[in-house]
Image (cartoon, rainbow, N blue to C red):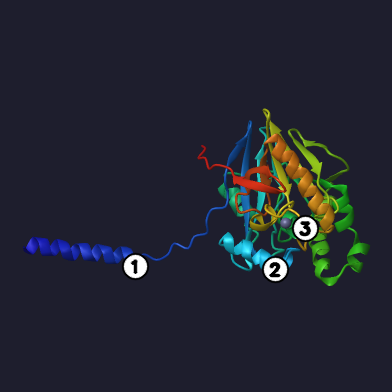
Amino acid sequence: MMKALTAAVLGITVLAAQAAAPLAKLTTPGFARVMVGDFEVTPLNDGTADLPMVDLLHNDKDRTQAALNKAHLGSPTTTSTNAFLINTGSKLVLVDTGAGTLFGPTLGKLVDNLKASGYRPEQVDDILITHFHPDHVGGLMADTKVAFPNATVHADRRDADYWLDAARMAKAPKDVAGFFQGAQVSLTPYIKAGKFKAFDRNGEVVPGISSYASYGHTAGHTSYVVESKGKKMVVVGDLIHVAAVQFDHPGVTIGFDSDPRQAAAARAAVFGKIAREGDLVAAAHLQFPGIGYIAENGKSWTWTPANYTLRP
Ligand SMILES: [Zn+2]
């Protein structure tokens, strides 16, 4: 009797200790890993930002809100920023760099996640930029130093000409001037060191990775086609921002688009090609890791996230 009672008391004590465990509150690690042929691809999360998508999307606000509600998303909408590290076997290539310090404390986690994924920033050989917005180029700098000291940066000349133009910045409306400033602060040290290379047309930038013009979101917005052993992945940058709205209604554009009509046309063209060819997609602002497949569905698209796999 006494023994049973003691056990019961002990049982209660153990339960109480479990209930009092504090929340771990560690940030979710922000890297994943997929293979494209022989290339190892590491999606890296730079963090999330809460964006007022109901106001930013060029769409009926009630319709946007209804689509967000259906997807269990709030307003403002928590939005990932993803970059992609690709080890081709001969080169370590980073596509986009996150926001660095340009977009507040909830972004700028890319280098920490890159290190957690088993690499070091000084190992990066080449950086391919989709476009010069601050959440894609801000991570080129770590405070006042270059974040990737051994890397050469590549981008379409149209984006460089546009965002690095001091005269255009002087004439820009106040809310866009910061975008020019961010681009100039991030790129100038690389340009001065002779480590910026602009390209003018579609073609191979590093072995196995080619540029594919998808202008509209910005003047020189570029997708990158990664190809190894007959397998392909297309890094689409900012061709889409809000999965819950824009896959069903691809005509809906966003306030960040330089030329919304051209951006929607680029989305239709690139998504059509991807869907026909069955390529893997890597997107900057779809929920982390931003990797999946697109299928054509009449006038809309169906997004299927890639399966999760544990790899050594
Ligand atoms: Zn972006």
* Residue 141 visible in the shown view: no
- Please give the residue where the numbered disc 3 appears in the rendered image: 133
Q: Name the amino acid type tagged 3.
A: His
Q: Is residue 303 left or right of residue 15?
A: right
Q: Where, by quadrant of the figure, is residue 164 drawn? A: bottom right
- Please give the residue where the numbered disc 1 appears in the rendered image: 20
Whole-percent x and y of residue 14? 25, 62
Mark 3, ligand 1, within 8 Å: the answer is: yes
- Please give the residue where the numbered disc 2 appears in the rendered image: 61
Q: CA distance from mark 2 to mark 3?
A: 25 Å
Say the numbered circle drawn on residue 276.
Answer: none
Label 2, secondary structure: give it: helix
Q: Name the amino acid type tagged 1.
A: Ala
Q: Residues within 10 Å of mark 2 (few under 14, many from 20)?
A: some
Q: Is residue 177 left or right of residue 312?
A: right
Residue in view at x 84 percent, y 71 percent: 174
Is label 1 in contact with label 2 (beta carbons under 8 Å)? no
Q: Where, by quadrant of the figure, is residue 10 drawn? A: bottom left
Residue in view at x 88 percent, y 50 percent: 158
